[in-house]
Image (cartoon, grey):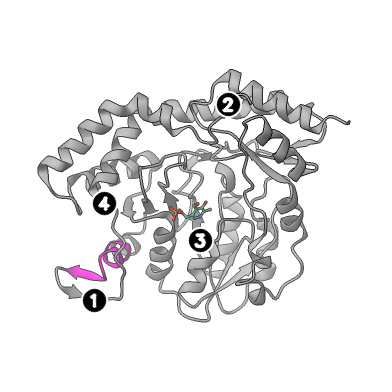
Amino acid sequence: MSRKLEFVDLKTQYAALKDRVAERMQRVLDHGQYIMGPEVKELEERLAASTGARHCITVASGTEALLISLMALGLKPGDEVVTTPFTFAATAEMIVLIGAVPVFVDIEPDTCNIDATQIEAAITTRTKAIMPVSLYGQVADMDTINAVAQRHGLAVIEDAAQSFGATYRGGRSCNLSTLGCTSFFPSKPLGCYGDGGAIFTSDDALAQACREIRVHGQSARYTHTRVGVGGRMDTLQCAIVLAKLERFEWELAQRHALGARYAELLRDVSGVRLLAVRPDRDCVWAQYTVFVERRAQVQAALAAQGIPTAVHYPRPLHRQPVYAPLHRGPELTHSIAAAEAVLSLPMSPDLTRSDQDRVVAALAQALAPS
Ligand SMILES: Cc1ncc(COP(=O)(O)O)c(C=O)c1O
């Protein structure tokens, strides 16, 4: 069998950053402020500036970012949050965890992002927020979503776990709505070497609430003014993200170039349909996902040639055992169809052109009529 490719090549990335990462980590080990050390503030300032948001609050993970955001908005049991079913479980999970109810709206069949034109019909007197997901690294239709939210007095939380660095109509993902939440899970566009995440907002009161909730609701040391969580991001992980920032613009350019090259190479491969990218935004390709026919067979054929693939996601949340009983609306046919056809191919800034050629050739071969 040929050499096995990495689905996400973090080893080459680490090799390129090894000295900077070691230096940054050593500095933390020397000063010893492992929790809420100076790197936490430094990272928050750098990230806020890069998105244009007034505040960045680092937290323990992308999941924690969603939870703390929902808590900061003061959502109560029984409140409703309109969201997409075609996402990682954490999106709806955090809504349910605080006792609120996710109301699932179908996706656009070509981008797999929430269909913003269907949101208004899902709003009731109990709706408090809309939570779109910028899936695969492409921002959802935020202007339409924000306009609906404004008409109904709702907050918007962008689940930007997969889209840090993406642009939308001149703005940056994470700074396009009331709150933006991202993840620094290692394979994300901007990852750490463990768990981490961040919340972005330009609302001073919400930022303060998030900061307090992150540390058990403390407004001052041992003064607990609200219910919070233990949701801090370690200083060491912040130091790692700071080291990675030095390469991040180059990595984004690589993601764009590799995404464009995949599209070019796959455009005429029969049995493959490309994800649409709207002309007013870009995609940072957290995953390079396409739609294929005969997916199980294709995956097996690629695996036999040492090419790993993944399915993001095989079952929409309104069809998951734990969330299915909550779904009251119409059947979400585009989400179901996407779940049957999506296939993510190897993607990371260090994917070489020759490995990319190998993936495309294997895919074309697997889909060729026999
Ligand atoms: C869309 C989405 N939301 C939330 C999360 C949760 O992020 P984390 O793994 O950092 O908790 C992820 C991570 O996979 C995600 O892809």
Q: Which of marks 2 and 1 is nearer the N terminus?
A: 1
Q: Which of marks 3 and 1 is nearer the N terminus?
A: 3
Q: For the residues marked 4 and 3, what is the alpha-carbon distance in whole angstroms?
A: 21 Å
Foreground residue among 195 and 221: 195
The reply to whether callout 4 and callout 2 are in contact (CB within 8 Å) is no
Residue 211 appears in the figure:
yes
Which label number is shown at residue 90? 3
Q: Where is residue 262 in the image (x, y as percent from the top left)?
A: 65, 27
Q: For the residues marked 4 and 2, what is the alpha-carbon distance in whole angstroms?
A: 32 Å
Q: Is residue 298 left or right of residue 39?
A: right
Task: State yes or no: Cβ of the residue under disc 3 lies below 8 Å from any atom of ligand 1.
Answer: yes
Label 3 sits on a secondary structure element that is helix
In the picture, residue 251 is in which quadrant? top left
Q: Position of residue 154 (x, y in %)?
A: 52, 68
Please rate how many residues cluster around mark 3, counting C-alpha atoms within 10 Å: few if below 14, some from 14 to 19, many from 20.
some
- Residue depicted at x 35% and y 63%: 206
215 drawn magenta: yes
The magenta segment is 209-220
Q: What residue type is labelled 3?
A: Ala
53 drawn magenta: no
Q: Quadrant of the N terminus?
A: top right
Q: In this view, does 345 lie to the left or right of 160?
A: right
Task: State yes or no: Cβ of the residue under disc 4 lies below 8 Å from any atom of ligand 1.
Answer: no
Residue 274 appears in the figure:
no
Please rate how many residues cluster around mark 4, counting C-alpha atoms within 10 Å: few if below 14, some from 14 to 19, many from 20.
many
Which label number is shown at residue 234? 4
- Residue depicted at x 15% and y 72%: 222
Residue under pointer 1: 225
Residue under pointer 2: 258
Indicate whether 119 appears above or below 98: above
